[in-house]
Image: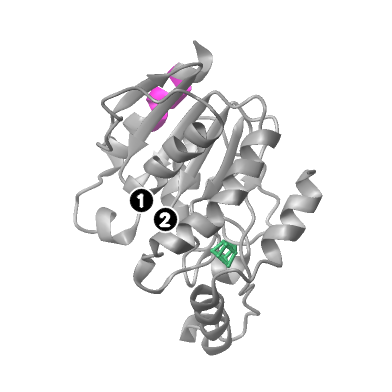
Amino acid sequence: MTWKSLTQKITKCERCPRLRQYCRAIAEKKRRQYLRESYWGRPVPGFGDPRAPIWIIGLAPGAHGANRTGRMFTGDSSGDWLYGALYQFGFASQPSSTDRNDGMKLHGVYISAAARCAPPDNKPSLLELRNCSQFLDQEFLLLDRTRIFLGLGKIGFESILHVLKRQGVAIPTPTPKFSHGATYYIGDYTLLASYHPSRQNTQTGRLTQPMWLEIFKNLKTLNEA
Ligand code: SF4
């Protein structure tokens, strides 16, 4: 498996009929402010540095974010939070991410998600997550320098534990639990957890900018250790 063949496999995937129908319908209907744009509407591959020591895993593409632009966390407010923090700590070349051809480069970071298709109400089913987990496994094998994981939200966090387990890494007992700011050391890997920077979290104050930036400060410290 190469990066190129993995990207092709992801973008052509039709394994979850409910999600594929939803993404296509969103891409056809569009949001009023994006009517002149051509939506991506396909599964979204991961993005970033193939030699990254840090791998960030979110939930799924946003219906009018990555499902529109075709790049993870690009074109919505979650992306504004993520790329803003990555830029501030030297991991991204630009503070904002609006278009997959905007020239953004990531340094030492790779970004993907537990599901590659936008789900209705941001809720993929367990079966859909299981279907999509094959792509995380393939990325794990390609990202052979990754040692630090950041799981965004409970699903992103647990998807990392599942990948490590499937790849034969011993998961400690009791099993690490999702909690904002938690850090776990699992074999050669370090796993951090953060609330997802979704509007639901950022507009309610569940996740604030200081809380969010603290996560990236820890990430940078771990990466430089
Ligand atoms: S969610 Fe993943 S497995 Fe399901 S159709 Fe999309 S890319 Fe394929």
The picture quadrant for ligand 1 comes to bottom right
Residue 203, by quadrant, is bottom left
Residue at the location (40% across, 59% down)?
126
Disc 1 crowd, CA 10 A, few/some/many (<14, 14-19, 20+): many
The kind of residue on which mark 2 rests is: Ser
According to the picture, the residue beneath numbered tag 2 turns out to be 78
Farthest-out residue, bottom: 29
Which one is earlier in the sequence, the residue at label 2 or at label 1? 2
Describe the element under mark 2 as helix, strand or loop.
helix
The kind of residue on which mark 1 rests is: Pro
Residue 125, by quadrant, is bottom left
Asked whether, in this view, residue 183 is left or right of residue 56, the answer is: left
Task: Indicate whether residue 217 is drawn in magenta.
Answer: yes
Task: Indicate whether residue 119 is drawn in magenta.
Answer: no
Asked whether, in this view, residue 42 is left or right of residue 116, the answer is: right
Instruction: Give the prevailing secondary structure in the magenta stretch.
Output: helix
Instruction: Work out whether 43 lies above or below 166.
Output: below
Residue 149 in the image: state x and y as whole percent. 47, 31
- Can the viewer see residue 101 in this picture? no
Which residues, given as a range, are shown in magenta?
216-221
According to the picture, the residue beneath numbered tag 1 turns out to be 197
Asked whether, in this view, residue 1 is left or right of residue 178, the answer is: right
Residue at the location (61% across, 65% down)?
43
Depth order, front residue of 18/80:
18
Report the quarter where the N terminus lies.
top right
Instruction: Work out whether 66 lies above or below 180.
Output: below
Spatial CA distance of label 2 from label 1 is 5 Å
Asked whether, in this view, residue 177 is left or right of residue 192, the answer is: left
Disc 2 crowd, CA 10 A, few/some/many (<14, 14-19, 20+): many
